[in-house]
Image (spheres, grey):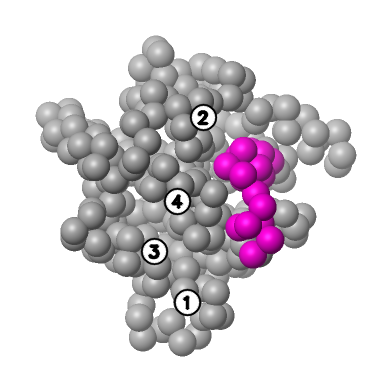
Amino acid sequence: MKGLYTDDPLGRDQLKEWEKKAIEKFSTKMSDKEKPFPCIPATIGFSKNQLRYSFIGDPREPFTLYELAEALSSYTDVSRKIGSNTSLIVFYETPEDMKTAYTVEDYEEIFWKHLSGLRSIDRFDWPEDLPIDPHHPVWEFCYNGEKYFMYCATPAHKNRKSRHFDEMMLAITPRWVLQEFNKSRHFAKGIKQQIRKRLAAYDSAPIHPDLNSYGEEDNFEWRQYFLRDDDTSLSKCPYHRFLNFFNSNQ
């Protein structure tokens, strides 16, 4: 199984050079007090050492999908034992030619191919209580029997710094973590207001119009997984289009 790591500075010597740099940069981002990262639950998870990390290969290579699947399977098995602010952070080894030439839209296509690819090799059935249509307000991504919120950051994001990282990166949060966060509506509402204030200060782009709350009639979760650097978005979710591609090639 692909290994899961904690952010242990003493253990960084065991990492490859690119892995070490990635987790150091991520740690700096999460602990910045002068310009705090907008997602407050993520910073809490970081401070409590409840985040887990995995390092996988070039996002363009076919084998990397299987590394992602192994990492997510490993995390699913242990996530409920970690804490109520846990997420899995996945760093892709992103070659320099990608960082130089790939656009936000290029990374967007890779992201959706990987989500569809995960589903195509998932050994679990799709949950019966969840719609299969991404254009349903309560649809969300599932893998290994667990419901997840997905977040993608890329080297190509410039204006939306909250979605920028030097390597292509995923933050994968179980739905049960978000449900725990939303137990107190008053508390959750206050935190969400603070997050939006932080976003306005953190990004040079306006808050993306696709940001919304799960379950609202005008909300589609898939739109929030990958935010573009401007206020545009895909008109239709590509999840099933790529899923059909994978299924037809098996």
The amino acid marked with disc number 2 is Trp
Residue 110: image location, x then y, percent: 66, 44
Tell me how far mark 4 sits from mark 3, CA to CA.
11 Å
> CA–CA distance between discs 4 and 1?
18 Å
Q: Which residue is mark 4?
A: 164
Q: Residues within 10 Å of mark 3 (few under 14, many from 20)?
A: some
- In the visual, does 224 lie left or right of 45? right
The nearer-to-camera label among 4 and 3 is: 4
Task: Pick the quarter of the image with the C terminus.
Answer: top right
Residue in the image at 40% along x and 67% along y = 25
Q: Secondary structure at mark 4?
A: loop
Sequence-wise first label, 2 or 4: 4
Q: Which residues are magenta?
A: 96-113
Q: Secondary structure at mark 3?
A: helix
Give the image quarter of residue 62. bottom right
Using the image, determine if residue 50 lies above or below residue 179: below
Would you say 17 lies left or right of 120 here? left
| Comparing labels 3 and 2, the label whose residue is closer to the camera | 3
Q: Which residue is mark 3?
A: 26
The residue indicated by pointer 2 is: 222
Mark 2, Cα crowd under 10 Å, few <14 / some 14-19 / many 20+, is many
Residue 13 higher or lower than 124, as above or below:
below
The first of marks 3 and 2 along the sequence is: 3
Say whether disc 2 or disc 1 marks the residue closer to the N-terminus.
1
Q: Identity of the amino acid at label 3?
A: Phe
Instruction: Please say if the residues under marks 4 and 3 sit with CB atoms less than 8 Å apart.
Output: no
Q: Is residue 228 magenta?
A: no
* Residue at 33% from the left image edge and 61% from the top image edge: 29
